[in-house]
Amino acid sequence: MAIAIQIDIPGVTLERYDEAVEIAGFLPGGLLPSGALFHWVTKTNDGIHIVNVWKSRGEYDQFAARQAEIIQEIGVDLASIRVEFFEVHNYLSGIG
């Protein structure tokens, strides 16, 4: 079952997010890792807000281990991050 992950990271700027994306080897508007279906990020009043949709929790969990290393590499305290999971009833994609 597909899952959505909502991630709030207080105190992080979009520039630091871009640094993490670069370290991970992703390109803006580029391809997602295997198992990921959708990703977006926006600035909030106190940091950034990220939403991901993955094919399964297991596939996300495998990626999350590397993601945690990168987050720590850019100096973010993992304890400050708020993560919430949702079961996805349906999603639509424009990718063919």
Image: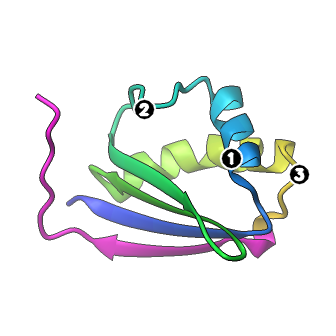
Identify the image quadrant of residue 86.
bottom left
User: In the image, which residues are magenta?
Assistant: 79-96
Dot 3: element:
loop
- Position of the C terminus, as image quadrant, is top left
Residue placed under numbered mark 2 in the picture: 33
Q: From mark 1 to mark 2, how far is it between C-alphas?
A: 17 Å
- Label 1 environment density (alpha carbons within 10 Å; few <14, some 14–19, many ≥20): many
Measuring from the top left, give residue 24's x and y in whole percent. 64, 30
Which residue bears the numbered disc 3?
75
Q: Amino acid at mark 2?
A: Pro
Q: Residue at x 77, y 74 (%)?
A: 80
| In this view, 35 is above or below 23 | below
Q: 62 and 69: which one is in front?
A: 69
Which callout, 1 or 2, points at the residue further toward the start of the chain?
Answer: 1
- Tell me if 92 is positioned left or right of 67 in this view: left
The disc, 3 or 2, on the residue closer to the chain's N-terminal end is 2
Image quarter of the N terminus: bottom left
Query: In the rendered structure, does residue 83 fall within the stretch colored magenta?
Result: yes
Residue assigned mark 1: 17
**Circle 1: element type:** helix
